[in-house]
Image: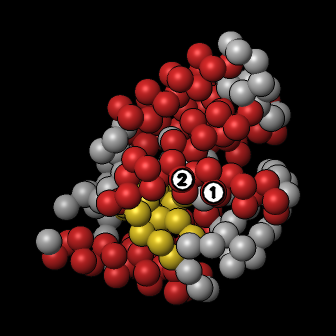
Amino acid sequence: MKINIAIAGGPCTGKSTLAAYLFATLKTKGYDYDLIAEENRKLKKEFGDYRSPFERFYMWRQQEREELRSAAADGFVTDTPLFHLYVSARMYAKEDRDKLAVRELFRMCLETDDRYQVIVMATSPVEIPYHADQCRNAGLETAIYRHGLIRSFVEHFWTEKLCFVEGSLEERVKHVEDHLERMRKV
């Protein structure tokens, strides 16, 4: 059973750390998963921050290409699900013309409805230590706000796919492993 896992939430709230640790844990247990990293991290140094929602189309294609390249038998783990790009574009749309990009990204989200079988989110982003890295520093308030936007979007469209986690990194991975085990028994 192929189960693609999306780690979702606000910026700098432990998504990449959780994705990497979960990936390593699943691999050591004999599962064949790929780890799909955030393409934006690779390009940010070269191109800088997004300047418009239209630039998110490019990132969508870059991120989607990496997901589609995954050939692992059991699925992939990503810390940048495609719907993050829609939520971000919506948040930063300033001009009326930006609504075109936002609308198209929304449509693209709905087309990838079956892309992720599990969407993992922290119950509370405040519980996870906020950490700014060299790639970005949104600020804790923005991170909490964006986490709420993403959570609201996922709860509205894919409630049945949600797996809420809390606690230490090890506890969060255990929550996901238990969830996957229940899915495999069905």
Residue for badge 1? 148
Query: Disc 2 vs disc 1: Cβ atoms closer than 8 Å?
Result: yes
Q: Residue furthest top?
A: 97
For the point 50% across and 41% down, the residue is 82
Which residue is denoted by mark 2 in the rendering?
A: 152
Q: Residue at x 53, y 23 (%)?
A: 103
Quadrant of the rendered structure where residue 175 is?
bottom left
Instruction: Note whether residue 74 is visible.
Output: yes
Where does residue 142 sit, x and y in percent of width and height? 79, 54
Kindly identify the amino acid type of the residue bearing the numbered disc 2.
Ser
Crowding near the residue tagged with mark 1, few <14, some 14–19, many ≥20 C-alpha atoms within 10 Å:
some
Q: Is residue 124 above or below residue 115?
A: below
Compared to residue 163, the image places residue 143 above or below, namely above
What quarter of the picture does the N terminus occupy? bottom left
Name the spot of residue 51 as percent of width and height, x first. 79, 26
Q: Is residue 172 left or right of residue 41?
A: left
Secondary structure category for the residue under label 2:
helix
